[in-house]
Amino acid sequence: MLSIRPLEEAELSAVYRRVARDFPPIEYPPLRKMRQHLENGFVEGRLCARQSLEAAYAFLLSAPEVSSRLLLLYAVEPEMRGLGVGSAFLRSILEDFAACDGLYAEVEKPELAASSDERRKCLRRIAFYERLGFVRVPRLFYSIYGVDMYLYYRPLANPEPPAPSRAAAELTALYNGILAPRERFNLLTYPQ
């Protein structure tokens, strides 16, 4: 049985240590900025437990002018992988945000992976999202902090996936809430 609930501010430091373990430093903000983003409402955290054990966490990015959300960080504890926790947790998130137009997810381009192991991880992530109804936004160049990504989208309240130009505009608006003006050059997104 899974228990899913919002992240409380007092829990951020402990969850942040897991983020630092699970993601390269370029893919997440410093703790003080993450705390600020949570306080400002640009980022929302979710926690998942299985039989009272930490199972997974998610951070979602929002902006007032965008009805979709971005799955900013999403990870399942290594010992919980392969048990259906990740799928069940993401389904719960999709249900909780059903009133939104949709949910974006980023995946590093597998063809640019530095090793065959990294390539396999990227391909597994893509398969995971596709099993849950995400589709790749076509004809979109998307890069954040020099990491070229594929952008995936799961339609929710709006059944139509966004056109590349809309996806580019929405991602820019979503990231503008958490990137300082001097950092915004690190986000490149445009239709091809």
Image: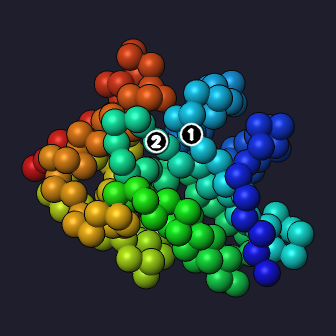
Query: Pointer 2: what residue?
Result: 62
In the rendered view, tell whether residue 56 sits above or below residue 22.
Answer: below
Choose between 6 and 15: the one closer to the eye.
6
Q: Position of residue 192 (x, y in %)?
A: 10, 50
Residue 84 appears left or right of 173: right
Name the amino acid, label 2: Ser
Q: Is residue 17 visible?
A: no
Name the amino acid, label 1: Val
3D distance between C-alphas at marks 1 and 2 = 6 Å
Choose between 136 and 27: the one closer to the eye.
136
- N-terminal of the two: label 1 or label 2? 1
Q: Position of residue 118 (x, y in %)?
A: 49, 64
Residue 128 appears left or right of 35: left
Report the coloring of the rendering: rainbow
Residue name at image x 58 percent, y 58 percent: 74
Query: Pointer 1: what residue?
Result: 43
Q: Most extreme residue toward the left, as rendered?
A: 192
Residue name at image x 35 percent, y 64 percent: 157
The image quadrant where one finds the N terminus is bottom right
Residues under numbered marks 1 and 2 in contact, where contact means CB atoms less than 8 Å apart = yes
Q: Residues within 10 Å of mark 2 (few under 14, many from 20)?
A: many
Residue 29 appears left or right of 20: left
Q: Quadrant of residue 31?
A: top right
Residue name at image x 21 percent, y 57 percent: 162
